[in-house]
């Protein structure tokens, strides 16, 4: 099961009852965070989740509303005597930007692994998460992400018995591991059926609508997308500041056909996003306004 929480849904600045946009996921004991603006720690606390299992943090770009919460979070992790490494993924300049922020968090009891995104698209495999960064179009280098959980094929007990594979290895083979023991090599493909449909979450914020977004959000279980402005008269503003309106987000969702779309990264001037849902749902009916702490659990499909 993949647990998902939209920790906040604001853009630019945190407001009372509207934290900055960040997404947290939990899967198989490892947590992943995308973006970490000011106040993200409080949003995690409000959700009641823990910082300890956060092993990976992905950044879309280095505007303050997406990264200024990092040094405080690193200090909290350090104060909890973390020793496990933390992986950071982000656009070009990652280590330079993080080191600059770390002037106020210089000594940490755990290592940081930096993974700078190269080119227009890159895949990272982290703790069972397949993370794909893809370039979008903002006024600085910015990436969207998809996070996928692969699902192996069905375990064939009869084949495993026939091949006399010791039962103690079955669990690891099911997870896709190749095992060498007692002079034998056991391959997962010997006991697993064809790969089954996994889970996919797409996330993009701070961008103009570009084809890559619809392409990568295609058939996602959940698509979380920037909707900076709900008001139709602000469409020119969205072009100027390189953001998106609700309507533009819905048009992307119409192409991508995810199971549902949540809007996020609202302008501080946008008080009631739900007021604009009717027109947006005419374009993509399964659109929902994101709100702080909005959560879901995604399960593999029944067969
Ligand atoms: Zn932003
Ligand atoms: Zn930005």
Image (cartoon, rainbow, N blue to C red):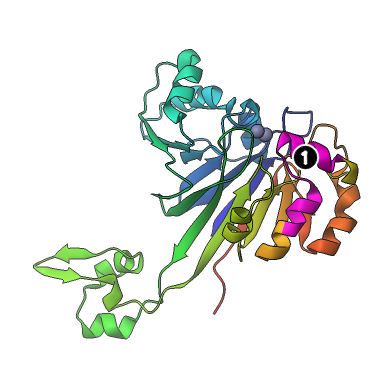
Residue 60 shows in this picture: yes
Q: Nearer the viewer, residue 235 or 8?
A: 235
Please tell me whether residue 137 is drawn above or below residue 173 in the rendered image: above
Residue, far top: 103
Q: Residue at 20% of width from left, 82% of height from top?
A: 163
Residue 115 falls in image quadrant: top left
Residue 117 falls in image quadrant: top left
Q: Residue 75 location in percent, x, y?
A: 49, 22
Write down the residue under mark 1.
238
Q: Residue 285 location in percent, x, y?
A: 80, 64
Region in magenta? 234-251
Question: Considering the image in quadrants, where does the C terminus appear?
Answer: bottom right
Dot 1: element:
helix
Magenta residues, dominant SS class: helix
Side (left or right) of 131 relative to 193:
right
Q: Residue at 73% of width from left, 63% of height from top?
A: 254
Side (left or right) of 83 relative to 69:
left
Asked if residue 245 is among those painted magenta in the image, a careful observer would answer yes
Side (left or right) of 259 relative to 174:
right
The quarter of the image that holds ligand 1 is top right
């Amino acid at each position: 099961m993949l647990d998902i929480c939209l920790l906040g849904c604001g853009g630019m600045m945190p407001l009372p009852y509207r934290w900055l946009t960040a997404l947290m996921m939990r899967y198989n004991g490892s947590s992943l965070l995308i973006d970490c603006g000011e106040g993200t720690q409080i949003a995690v606390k409000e959700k009641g989740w823990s910082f300890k299992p956060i092993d990976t943090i992905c950044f879309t770009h280095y505007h303050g509303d997406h990264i200024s919460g990092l040094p405080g979070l690193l200090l909290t992790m350090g104060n909890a005597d973390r020793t496990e490494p933390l992986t950071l993924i982000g656009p070009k300049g990652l280590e330079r930007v993080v080191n600059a922020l770390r002037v106020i968090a210089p000594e940490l009891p755990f290592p940081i692994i930096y993974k700078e995104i190269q080119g227009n698209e890159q895949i990272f495999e982290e703790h069972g998460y397949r993370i794909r960064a893809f370039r979008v179009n903002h006024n600085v280098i910015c990436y969207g992400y998809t996070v996928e959980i692969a699902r192996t094929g069905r375990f064939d007990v009869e084949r495993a018995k026939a091949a006399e594979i010791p039962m103690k290895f079955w669990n690891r083979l099911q997870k896709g591991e190749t095992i060498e023991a007692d002079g034998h090599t056991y391959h997962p493909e010997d006991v697993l059926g064809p790969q089954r449909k996994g889970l996919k979450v797409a996330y993009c914020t701070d961008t103009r609508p570009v084809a890559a977004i619809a392409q990568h959000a295609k058939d996602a279980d959940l698509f979380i997308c920037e909707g900076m402005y709900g008001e139709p008269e602000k469409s020119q503003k969205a072009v100027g500041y390189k953001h998106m309106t609700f309507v533009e987000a819905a048009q992307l969702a119409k192409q991508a056909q995810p199971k549902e779309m949540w809007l996020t990264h609202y302008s501080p001037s946008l008080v009631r996003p739900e007021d604009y849902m009717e027109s947006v749902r005419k374009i993509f009916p399964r659109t929902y306004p994101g709100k702080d702490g909005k959560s879901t659990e995604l399960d593999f499909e029944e067969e």
